[in-house]
Structures are given as structure tokens and as C-alpha cells.
Amino acid sequence: MPARLALCLILTLLAGLPAAAQGFAGMGSTAAEGFSSPGPETRLTFPHDHGPHPDFRIEWWYLTANLTGPDNIDYGVQWTLFRSALAPREAEGWASPQIWMGHAAATTPESHYFAERLARGGIGQAGVDTAPFEAWIDDWRMAGDDDLRKLQLTARGTAFAYDLTLSAQGPLVLHGRNGYSVKSADGQASHYYSQPHYRIAGTLTLPSGPVAVTGQGWLDREWSSQPLAADQSGWDWFSLSFETGARLMGFRLRGARGDFTSGTWIAPDGRATPLAPGAFQADPLEEATVAGRTLPIRWRVTLPERGLDVEVSALNAQSWMDTSFAYWEGPVRVSGSHGGRGYLEMTGYE
Amino acid sequence: MIAAALQALGSHWRRHPLQLATLLAGLALATALWSAVQAINAEARASYARAATQIGAGGLDVLEAPGGPIPLARYVELRRAGWQLSPVLEGRARLGEDRVSVLGLDPLSHPPLPALEAATEGDPETLAQMLARGGLLFAAPALAATLSATPGLPAVHASDRVPPGLVLTDIGVAERLLARPGQIDRLLILPGQPAGLTPLEQLAPDLQRRPSRTGTDTARLTDSFHLNLTAFGLLSFAVGLFIVHGTVGLAFEQRRAMVRTLRALGLSLRLLTGLMLGELLVLALIGGALGLVLGYLVAAALLPDVAATLRGLYGAPVAGGLSLRPSWVLGGLAMALTGTGLASAQALWRMTRMPLLSAPGLQAWAQRAARGERRMALTGLGLIAAGVAALGPVKGLIGGFALIAGIMLGAALLLPPTLGLVLRLGRRFARGPVGDWIWADMRAQLPGIGLALMALLLALAANIGVGTMVSSFRLTFTGWLDQRLVSELYLTARDDAQGARIAEWLIPRSDAVLPIRSAEFTVQGVPVTVYGVVDHPTYSRNWPLLEQTPNAWDRVNAGAAVFINEQLARSAALWSGDDVQLAPGWTLPVAGVYSDYGNPTGQAIVALPALLAHASAVPNRRFGVRLDPGQVPDLIRDLRTAFDLPASALIDQAGLKAQSLAVFDKTFVVTGALNLLTLGVAGFAILTSLLTLWSLRLPQLAPVWALGMTRGQLARLELARSVLLAAITALLALPLGLVLAWALLAVINVQAFGWRLPMYLFPVDWLRLFVLALVAAGLAAALPARRLYRLPPTELLKVFANAR
Amino acid sequence: MLLQIEDVTKTYPGARPVLQGVSLSLDAGQTLALTGESGSGKSTLLHLAGALDSFDSGEITLCGTPLSGLDDTGRAALRRSRVALVFQQFNLIPSLTVGQNLSFHARLAGRHDPAWTHELTDRLGLGDLTGRYPEQLSGGQQQRVAIGRALAARPDLLLADEPTGNLDETASAAVMALMLDLVRDSGTALFLVTHSERVAARLDLRAHLRGGRIA
């Protein structure tokens, strides 16, 4: 991959990722460039909103999974398709302004494998269809029925591959207010919903050979045109599934003017409760050197209103995604008031 | 003691400043011509290498479709099968007034390109601009300037990291500029493919995988051109060394007495040899440095034409500017040192063998000369035999040059014996004592001036040989153009659709509309352009066939046979009657071979329907139009108004021929210039020899003068003698030049370009060259002759009195 | 009078006068010895008498021809036809054989007499050497060839400038004896520059130069 080249590209285009916080100042006036802005009055409709929104600047289909092998070893799997638009439209052929990027990873307690794909829209190399649902880039696919209840997930890199079957055990979850998720005190927001209830079975192929795995998965869908405030430099994002059957999505956006935290509490039956800003607390307990920088790999996460006080620790501290733009993304273990598993994403650590 | 010895040795040069100047000039000339050629070659090679890193794909394998482009859908299909590929579309397009190469690629998947990296580093928005709707063209500054001034083009980014004459852009922009939507020329197979992919042979049996050709292609095509230049540079160098040899020899000769004295005074031979070696080293460095300056100027003057040739003939990306490389400076100085060493070896060796006290020679000069000539004759014959023998085992261009080197050097060595023979013969016909003396004297002078005459022989033979080759080539080429360019008008449409409309529009307005359509195939691993022609007498009547089978045109028109060009025939060893496989499942017998001097690559001709059946997406934009030549201007005007065609899209026959001949002439500008320079150096070599022989001449002339001849008579005789020797040498150079021409046409050209040319003779050129040689020799002799004429009798009388 | 030198002066550019009002005369068949110190102008006087160089003033008449009025061509013609020269060294044409050298002047003067040349060759003892080149001869042999060549042309006047100056005593005496014999036998006048009193004593006339004047 032309890493440096793509890095420049992505830094310029992909507004959704805090790693480029300094570059965001110019992205504030989205209206001038013709992109739509998320609005609190927007009501999400499915299956339409499972598909792409080319008039928004950025969008992703983001699936993480905590898996277990026959010998009780824990694994993590990531499958992400990013869409980034140079202009708010779609066109046929090379003229399309839509850029697609795929990230796939497989994490074991000892190793972390990842791969990246880039593609131009308009020629069919990557995209998302809704009837039936298919999201793809090259030979990586996430495909299934219209309501995303059954999905087949595949990806492969030079050293790993996976082929997983996902079936949803609960309903879709809309974050924030009806899927309108506020990201800063200034009102930056995105449209954001999840399907956190997947049960998963399939095969994970590692350099040592294929492993039959089972576990649970969490799909995030988010699109926006200006998701971060100018001063925000990165985020820490948690998706945790507890043994009680309850789930928690929480994030901390780090900003010069103070952190902004938010999240959603998901009851075992799938009922979602948005968390008030500041209710969700995440504090680093231990740091480690990863790819030459210092990152917290053990956290204390608290949500007093739910009696939650847990320690979240990385399964593999070196879950570094050394892709065009680099970030930390890996499976975590949860212990304390609640036991469980989940995924942690950390961006913007320089 | 060393200082004193050095002073004594150096005093020689102070007393003979002309000799010093001659020595330095000889060294400088030899180094200059050689370095000039080296600088040109190095610049071209650096351009290729730069181009390879600027637009190359780092030696990645590529996938290609025989006979046509790869559809975009095919690329997506392979990507979706997991293969990591990167699409490339390239072609020639006229952008404004410039005809440029357009290289379109997908910056997201393509391996890093310096131009893009530099641009995005400077401004991260660059890439977005490249992919956005308007697009962005990357071009070298000169081209970028003209493109920026052309309306209707995307924005232009000037970058010195793009090869000259090339426009680098997104594939989406390229397909618009080239009017080839949805087409891909090749797919780079990227490193780091995922595990467990279905093999390409299974997924895409219709696509061929081959190693990357970018860069190596240019190098292969232009290798012969550079080898030609190198050979010429070496020849010039050798000619220059003759001058050095002459002067160094004389300087050592004249210092014999001094060396003897110094040794008698107790200086060891080893020390003396060391001092003189040191002296030569210093002289070589000075001469070499002067030569480098001169060479740089010559190269800078010649490079624009060379660059134009390489771009025009081979499409090789070479800019006209020259840069100074340390390796070139060091190489030039090393060459000067080596040359000085070579040229001085004999003189040094002689000095070390010189006895402390001189003894009278037992052998007469005539016997020594005869023995030397016998030795030279044997060596010369041996060299010629070796050159001829080398042609067998040493294949290719190197063998050809070995042949030429053997013949040239051998012939040069044969010159003094041959001249000796001629002079002995001449003496038989001499009348009177003066005639007797002149012939005998020339014979006696031969060992001294022989080397300069060898230089003249080589220069003249090279002139005749190369001149004959170029003129033969030009004559053949002109005739071939007449046969090949038969249509009165050639036009290029914007795209296929416009092409079809124009063709329809033209049918009632012309005698015939002949589409010019081609597709790329691979024959025996070599790219071949296959043209499809319609059945029209224009072709069968005029096409320049070198050999053909019965009913050749009928069979080709029926799609049952193929014509191939001479280059393909020679490189693939395919001739009439052989079968040639153009694509899997498409094999045709060769119906004939045609001469093709327009390009160095392979070509073939089949019936148009046959081509269309085997190639996808054959562009239909170029046409030849047959009509009354008188109507051409009107038709051009009508076409331009009816279809809004730019002037450059319509070229009449005369214009095309003129363009072709212009390219041709550019190709040989350098050859001509080097030719003339070599002749100049040879003339200078004669002058040097005569000047250095000057002091040795006086004891020979003084007795004759004393016996009753005037200085004027003697001066005129000196002039005549030089001209006569040059004349005999020139006469001997003629057959040698013709042999050289033959070798160039029948051996070198076949290897270098893939075609063999008929040889034509140009006696008027020879006559001109003959006169030129006489003038050069006369001019060279004029200076010493004038000096003799003006010499006070006292100087002549000193010969008889001074103890020498 | 074969040779008449009257009040001749000669100065080389940038030097003191070499000859200052020298007068001499020589009849046909007469022999004259010119002696003098080194640098006294002996050779110069001989050169002027041989029409090899021009003088500043005075007159030299050779075979009735005043030299002052002659240009280069005239002087060359006179040298060719009337006089013969033998110098100290380098008399011979290196590219010609002894035989060719011997007959060269005679042929140039258009007076080649093979019988006479042959006789001279024999008497000078050069019979075996005619096929050789000058560089293969000893100094004495070379000077004998030069004398032979000079006399073969049957000149009116033989000018010899220390013809044995480069030879050892024995060779010198032999060569000088041969020359004087041959000069007498052929009736040629001789103008000999020498430093040897013994040789000078054998000639008809004698002149001594000192400081550019006849003493």
C-alpha cells in the first residue's frame, strides 16, 4: 500500500477520524461544500439507512467481534468499511468522488494481524447495496438479508482470513436521540445506530492454521459531515458486553476545552437509554508503549447510575492498526462490578 | 637534485611552447570528443532511469490482454476475486499543440510515484484535486507551461519528477483525454497479495502475465543508438591519441641528449623515468581538464538534437538539458590518463632502453622501415581476420562492432606498408634527381607521419562509411515514404463516434476512405502492433514488400495470411511461408515481408475484419483519404468547418513526409557533427606530425638547398608531398569506407534497427571528401612550409656547422 | 677571374660585423686556403662566395656574375651549375643511397657523366658502399662521398669548409690528400677553409682572416 500517499489522502478526506484533529478547523463549514449535516429531526428508515449516504462526507460500517476458540483462547476480529466523499454526489466510473477504505484485523492474545484496502467508488470495486444487503471492498464482504439479522462476513490479508456467520439476537439500537448522536458541546453530531446483538460462528484462519470460533459481535453504523469540534484531538470508544446481557457503548472525546463523554446503556432486552454528557467516565489506569507512542491499555470505567465500576484491559496491548491513518483497535476484558468482553478504540495519540 | 632535473626537463617545454600546446590540444581533443559522447549517453541513460523511477512500477509483473485493452469490468472482477492490482491506461494524445504521452493511473492503488508524493507533501489537497471532478495533470515544467496555456484542459501541476513529454494523471482523466472510456492497458500485480487466491491463469486465462517492461524497453531500443555513439566517441579518441603519440614521441626524442647528460651526471634511470611519468601525469590532467570543458560544450550543443532523436524515434524520455556528473569528470580524466599512457608507452620504453652512450646504427632507415612495415602488415591482417572471425561467435551488435573495429584498426596498420609500396612504385616513374629525391624522401618520412595518416585514413573511412550509410538510408527511406504514404490526406478524429461520422461524410467526397486501425499483440514475447487494412488497391499497388508469396494480397485480404515487417521477420526469424501466432488460437501464415523504416519495433498487417474478430476495442479514429491532390486544401477546409477539427488533426501527404524526413534528419545530425569533428582532428594530427617533424626535417632539406634549390621550391615540394600523401591515403580510404558502409548497413543496422538497407554509392560525396582531405592536408602542411620559405639561410647553414 | 670578392661586409642582425671590407680573388684552377681564428668569419666568407647567403655591401663576382644582383632563384641556379660544396658534416641527403648521393648534384646540374662518377667512386674507395645509406657510413666515408658528389658535378669552384674537421687525424689526412689530388686532376678551383697550417701550405694561395678583415 502506498502508505504515505494514502495517509495524505485520508488525512485530507476522512473527516471522521480524530487523528487529523488539526486539520479539522477548515472542515467546519460543511454547508459551503454542499454536504448535508446531521439533523436531530431526521428519522432513520430501514433498510434504506443501512445503505450509503453519499451526500454526507464520511460514513462507516464497523463490525467488531469477541470470539473464543475450542481451547478457550480469546480472539478479536474487526471488519470496517469507510466511505469518504470528495463531493456530495455519486457518479458512474472513475468520475465518482466517493472513496472507500476497508480495514480488517484479527487479534490473538499474542498477535495482531491487519490489512487495508482502498477503492474508488463508481466502478464497482467497493460499495454498499441494500437489497439484499451487501457491503464490500475487493473480496471482503459483509452480506446478508435486508434487516441485517443474518450476515456473512469475510476478509483476508496476507497472514490471516476469516469467514464468519452472524445472526442478530436482538433489535437495532439507535444512539442519542433517535440515532442523532451529539459529539461535542458545540453541537457536532452524527447519525449513529448499532446492532450489538450478534451471535457468531465461523472460521478464523491464522498463520498457525484455521480455528473454529464462536462468540459475539457488534455492528456500528455512523455517518456525518462534521463529527468533531475544532479542539477535539481524539477519542476513546468502548463497546462492552456484560455477562448480565446488558451492553454499554461509551466514548470520551478529548478536547482542549475538556473532555466530552457520552454513551448508550443497552438493557438485555435491547432497550437503549442515552447517557447524559458526563455520566460515562473512563480513566486510564495503565499505559504501554505501542508503536512508539504511549497509550492507556487498562481503564477504569464507571457509570454510577447503573452501579458500574469496572476495569477494562486490553487482550493484546499491541492491537495497533498501522494503516494509512493509524489507531488502536482491539478486544478487551471487563472485570469488576460487571464481568464481560468488548472492544476498545483509541485515536489521536501522538 | 630532483628540482634541478625537473627544471632541466621542463626547460624543454619552455623552449618549445608550440609542442606543449600541440600535446595539450591533442589530449584535449581526444578527451573532449570521447567525453562529449559519454556525457550525452549518460544524460540519456539518466533520463531513462529517472523516468523508470518516476513512472515505473518497480519491476512489478503486469497483466495484459493480447489484442486490445482490458475492460474496466474485468479489473473490478479480478479485484473482487481478491487480487491486488492497479490499472494503467496510457497513450499518445494531442493536447493543444503538443503531442504527448498520457499515463493514467489510479493513485489509490498505484505504487508510490515521486511526483505525487512530492505534490501531496507540499499540499495535502493535491490528491483530492487529482481525484475530484476537474482532475489534475502532472507534467515536467516545460510541458506544464504550454499545457497551462491550453484552454479546456484540467489544472496542471508542474513537477520535475515527471519525465519530459509525459502527462501523468488520474486514470479517469486519462480515459477522457485519450477518448478511451472504460479501458485499461495493463494491470500491475501489486506486492502483498492475500493468501489463498484463485490463480490468475484460472480467473483470467485471456490475460497474459509478463514482467514489467517500463524502462527496460527504452533501454533495449536505445542501446544500439548509444553503442553507435560510443563507437564514434572511441574512434575520435583514438584519432586524438595519434596527436599525443606524435608529440610525446618528439619531446622524448629531442630530450635524448638531455636525458643522457642527466644520467651521466648521476641521476638514476628509475628516478628520471619517474620524473617523466610525473610530467606526463600533470600534462594529462591539464589536457584532460581542458578536454572536459570542451567536451561539455560539445555535448551541450549536440544534446538537444540527440534528445529529439531519442524522443522521436524511440519515444524515449530525454530532456535537452545537460547536467554535470562527478563520475563523468572522473571518467574523462581517467580516459585522458589512460590515453596519455598508451600514447607515451613507446617513447618511455625507448628511453629506458636507451644506452648511456650512443652508438651508430647498423641498420639503415630503409631496412628498419621495411621491417616495421612488415610487422604492421602482419598485425593489420591479423586484426582484420580477427574482426571477421568475431562476427561468428560474438552475436549481435557487439559482434558487428568487433568486425568494424578489426577492419578499421587492421586497415590503419596496413596503411604505412601500403603507402610504402605505392611510394616505391612511384619512384620507378620518377624523372630526374629531384623526383628521385622526393619519392625517396616521402618514403623516409613515412614512419614519422604514418600515424597521422592513419588517423586521416580512419577519419576519411568513417566519413565515407557513415556518409554512405546515412545517404543510402535516406534514399531508401524517401522511396519507402513514397510507397508507404500514398493517401493524399491523413486525419485523426477525436473519438470513434466522430471517426465514424467523418468516414461517412467523406465517402461521397473522396475516392476512398482507408481506416488506419491497429491493436497490440505479443509475438514470441515481443510487442507487435497489428494493423487491419481494408481491401483496396492503394495497398496492393504500393505497399513496399521485400518478399512475397503468390497471391499474397488476395490471401491477406481474405483474412488467411499476414504481412509482417522486416523488424519482426528478423527478430523472430519468421519469413514468407512461416506461421506466426498473433494470439492464442490465431495463427496465420506469413504471406510477405515489408520494409518498415518508421520505427524500431515489430508490426504486422492483416485484413481489417480479421483484426476486429480477434481484438477488442480497436480504435477507429485515424483515416487515410484518397482523392485528387488538387482538392486536398478544399477538403481540409470543409472538414475543419464540418467537424470542428483542430489543424493538427489533418495532415496532407506532403506535410507528413516532411515531418518524417525531419525526424530522420535529426537522427543523424549527431553522426554528421561527430564525423566532421573527427576529420578536423585528423587534419590537426597531420599538422602536429609535420610540426613535430620540423626540426628533424632541416638536416634532410639543407643539403638539397645547398646543392641548388631555392627555399620556395622546397616549401612547395613540402606542400605537394603532404597533399600527395593525403591523396594516396584518401584513395585508400575509399574502399575501406565502402567496406565500413557495408558493415554498417548489413550488420549494424540489422542488429540495431532490425532492417537491412540496400547500399547506394555517392561518388560526388567522395569527390567532395577527397578534396576536403587534400585541403586539410594542404592546410596542415602550409604552416611548416611557410616557415621553411621564410627561414633565413643562416639557419639552414647551421646544420652543416653545429655539432648536433 | 673565377671569383672576385671586393670590399664585402656582412653583419648578422643584432651582432657585431662578421666581415668588414674583405677582398679576395681566385682564378680558374687555382686553390686557395683561408685560415683564421674560430669566429673570424671564415665560414661566412665561404658561404657568401658559394651564393648561399647575401651580404650587406661590396661585391662578389662568381664566373662573371655579380652576386649582389641575384635573387634566391638566381643564387640557387648558380650553386647548382657553378659551385660545389663540402661542409664539415651533414652534406648528404639521408634518404638517398651513397650511389644516388654521388650522382645527385651532377644530375641536378645536368652534367651527369657516369664514367667520371664511376672513376671518382673508385678513386674515393666507395665502390662497395654505393648501396648503403649515409647513416650507415663512418664520418670519413661520409666526407669522401660528399667530395665525390661535389666533383662529379664538374663545378668551376669547389668550396670546402673544414671538410675533415670532424675526423680523426689519420682519416683527416687521407681524406684531405684524396681531395687535393682529385681537385688538381680535374682542374677545379678550390676555396678551402681550414685551420691546418699543414694543409694550407699545400695550396696555391693563402689568406688569413682576423676580426673580419684579411690580415
Image (tube, coloured by chain):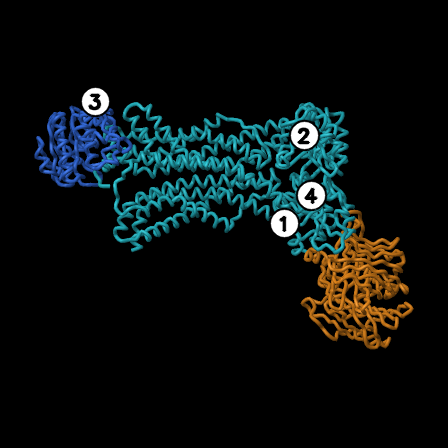
Chain colours: A orange, B cyan, C blue
Report which residue position mark 2 lands on.
Answer: B577
| Mark drawn on residue B54 | 1
Which amino acid type is shown beneath numbered disc 4? Glu
Query: In 3D space, how far apart are the residues under numbered discs 3 and 1 (Cα atoms)?
Result: 89 Å
What is the chain identity of the residue bearing mark 1? B
What is the chain identity of the residue bearing mark 2? B
Query: In 3D space, how far apart are the residues under numbered discs 3 and 2 (Cα atoms)?
Result: 82 Å
User: Is residue B351 toward the left or the right of residue A167 in the image?
Assistant: left
Q: Judge depth for marks 3 and 2 and give the one in front.
A: 2
User: Is residue B30 toward the left or the right of residue A126 in the image?
Assistant: left
**Earlier-in-chain disc, 4 versus 2:** 4
Q: Position of residue B634 (x, y in %)?
A: 69, 26
Which amino acid type is shown beneath numbered disc 2? Gly
Q: Secondary structure at mark 4?
A: strand
Q: Residues within 10 Å of mark 4 (few under 14, many from 20)?
A: many
Q: Secondary structure at mark 2?
A: loop
Name the foreground residue: A123 vs C54. A123
- Kindly identify the residue that appears in the image at 49 percent across and 37 percent down: B387
| Mark drawn on residue C113 | 3
Q: Position of residue B213 (x, y in %)?
A: 65, 45
